């Protein structure tokens, strides 16, 4: 037992330390985490439990989606849901068909097995998208579409993968059950996720426990309860837990910052565990014969299947309403930023567990496609966005936040706002600023000295202003303390 704990701890530490390199070089975490697993496998760690890997991967994906939902702005989600919803349904079907056709032409797979490979490779990955897009300075509109798509396209991809694997092994197919099953799963997932999320907000806000550290655990348990219950009644648990995260992140909630910080750590831990396990399953020697075919499919996926599915899905929406109209530059970026991640590799375990003919080929090709495609696209998204003129100033860092408990209203906190040189408050007196009634300026720290916030004080760049507020959301902070970032250029 101790030996397994030792090896597991070393793998996790190596994976965590590798994130520093990933952030510095812009390498997606997936590539490094999987690399750690592959190195451990070649060094003698023997792990071939596909069923356990699939179950751990699906659970880890649920945790990642809950964390991603917590960080999602509900208004941005609602503004993006139509184009993102089309990409996560119609777009997935188009990608599956196009990749299936390429696989039929380029590989030994038959048509149905090619479609299965297409279903496996079709979804974008929430973990990869959330981590790579953070700090890229993309327009909120595009970031919202990409994040919402990645958070909502897993259900149909999982359903299609399971359905096609069943059709290949049993020979039974029912188009009516396919359409009805997708609609039922998505509808039940959305309704149950929203309803149980609202209920969880009430529980968290009203329950009084002695340890503050139990609130994040309560939020995680409530999210996983929603996921499991939704799956048991025939809905889609992944969409449900993503909806729970969105509800928690956009309602008045006690200890929200603690919950978000905890879930951010849990999401990273889930990614590390999931990617390292998947890396352990790979036998590098078995990948080598499939690399040329996998590279051809990767090129076809990036340059043909994804762009065509985006164009054919997005273009008709622009005819319905101008708010759904995307310029050619925006469509190029949406196409290139369709990042893969652990989800396709997890789905590639389904054919293996169902003894689908050619399942080992599908797994190995999927692995190469995902790792190569994610590395190429992840490293080039920011430069491409700059070249297209679709980047703005980086978002300001989140202020240090200390949440208030006790009699304070839910969401109350003390914020440390560092004044940037272009903040409107710089050079102004406190008495001349329009400070909302529900906010109190508690202190100002300048050059390491604490200054009482008198009305005559004039603010200077790099002042740290401590604000007590009952609404600690960034959108509701005093505008005088928050610089306005320039809008990115967008051309049609």
Image (cartoon, rainbow, N blue to C red):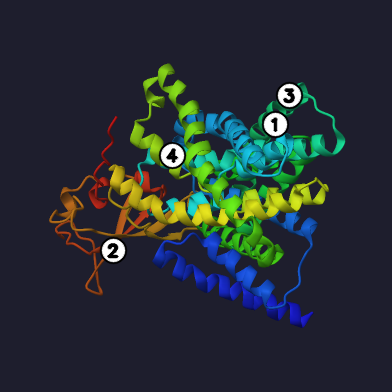
Who is closer to the viewer here, 137 or 232? 137
Instruction: Give the spatial CA distance, label 1 vs label 2.
Output: 49 Å
Closer to the eye: label 1 or 2: 1
Q: Secondary structure at mark 1?
A: helix
Instruction: Give the spatial CA distance, label 4 vs label 3.
Output: 29 Å
Who is closer to the viewer here, 103 or 43? 103
Q: Residue at x 40, y 35 (%)?
A: 331
Q: Residues within 10 Å of mark 4 (few under 14, many from 20)?
A: many
Closer to the eye: label 3 or 2: 3
Q: Residues within 10 Å of mark 3 (few under 14, many from 20)?
A: few
In the picture, the disc for residue 443 is 2
Labels 4 and 3 touching (C-beta < 8 A): no
In the picture, the disc for residue 430 is none
48 w.r.t. 489: above or below: below
Label 4, on which residue? 334
Label 1, on which residue? 188
Q: Is residue 209 left or right of residue 146?
A: right
Position of residue 374 measured from the top left corner of the image (x, y, whole percent): 51, 54
Q: Secondary structure at mark 3?
A: helix
Position of residue 467 measured from the top left corner of the image (x, y, whole percent): 33, 57
Label 3, on which residue? 180
Who is closer to the viewer here, 161 or 468? 161
Q: Is residue 58 visible?
A: no
Q: Is residue 279 left or right of residue 55?
A: left
Instruction: Give the spatial CA distance, label 4 vs label 2.
Output: 44 Å
Q: Residue at x 64, y 51 (%)?
A: 366
The mark nearer the N terminus, 3 or 2, is 3
Q: Secondary structure at mark 2?
A: strand
Q: Residue at x 58, y 54 (%)?
A: 292
């Amino acid at each position: 037992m101790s030996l397994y704990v030792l090896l597991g701890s070393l793998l996790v530490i190596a994976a965590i330390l590798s994130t520093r390199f990933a952030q510095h070089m812009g390498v997606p975490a997936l590539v490094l985490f999987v690399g750690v697993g592959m190195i451990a496998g070649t060094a003698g760690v023997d792990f071939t439990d596909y069923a356990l890997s699939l179950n751990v991967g699906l659970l880890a994906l649920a945790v990642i989606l809950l964390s991603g939902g917590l960080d999602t702005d509900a208004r941005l989600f609602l503004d993006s849901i139509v184009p993102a919803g089309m990409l996560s349904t119609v777009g997935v079907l188009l990608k599956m068909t196009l990749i299936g056709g390429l696989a039929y032409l380029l590989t030994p797979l038959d048509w149905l097995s090619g479609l299965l490979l297409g279903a496996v490779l079709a979804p974008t990955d929430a973990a990869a998208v959330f981590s790579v897009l953070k700090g890229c300075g993309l327009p909120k509109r595009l970031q919202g579409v990409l994040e919402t798509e990645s958070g909502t396209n897993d259900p149909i991809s999982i359903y299609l993968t399971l359905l096609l694997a069943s059709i290949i092994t049993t020979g039974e197919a029912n188009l009516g059950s396919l359409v009805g099953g997708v609609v039922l799963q998505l509808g039940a997932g959305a309704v149950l996720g929203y309803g149980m999320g609202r209920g969880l907000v009430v529980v968290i806000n009203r329950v009084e426990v002695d340890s503050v550290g139990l609130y994040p655990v309560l939020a995680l348990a409530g999210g996983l309860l929603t996921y499991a219950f939704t799956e048991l009644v025939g809905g889609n648990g992944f969409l449900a837990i993503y909806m729970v995260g969105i509800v928690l992140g956009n309602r008045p909630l006690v200890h929200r910052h603690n919950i978000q910080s905890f879930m951010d750590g849990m999401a990273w831990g889930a990614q590390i565990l999931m990617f390292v396990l998947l890396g352990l399953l790979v036998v590098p020697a078995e990948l080598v014969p499939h690399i040329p075919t996998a590279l051809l499919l990767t090129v076809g996926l990036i340059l043909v299947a994804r762009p065509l599915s985006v164009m054919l899905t997005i273009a008709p929406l622009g005819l319905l309403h101008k708010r759904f109209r995307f310029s050619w530059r925006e469509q190029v970026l949406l196409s290139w930023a369709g990042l893969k991640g652990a989800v396709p590799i997890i789905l590639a375990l389904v054919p293996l567990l169902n003894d689908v003919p050619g399942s080992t080929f599908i797994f190995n090709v999927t692995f190469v496609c995902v790792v190569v495609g994610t590395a190429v696209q992840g490293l080039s998204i920011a430069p491409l966005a700059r070249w297209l003129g679709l980047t703005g100033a980086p978002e300001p860092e989140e202020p240090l936040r200390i949440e208030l408990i006790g009699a304070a209203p839910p969401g109350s906190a003390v914020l440390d706002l560092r004044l940037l040189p272009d903040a409107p408050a710089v050079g102004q007196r406190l008495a001349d600023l329009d400070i909302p009634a529900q906010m109190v300026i508690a202190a100002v720290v300048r050059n390491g000295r604490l200054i009482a916030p008198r009305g005559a004080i004039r603010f200077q760049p790099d002042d740290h202003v401590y604000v007590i507020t009952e609404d600690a959301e960034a959108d509701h902070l005093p505008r005088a303390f928050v610089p306005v970032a320039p809008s990115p250029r967008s051309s049609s």
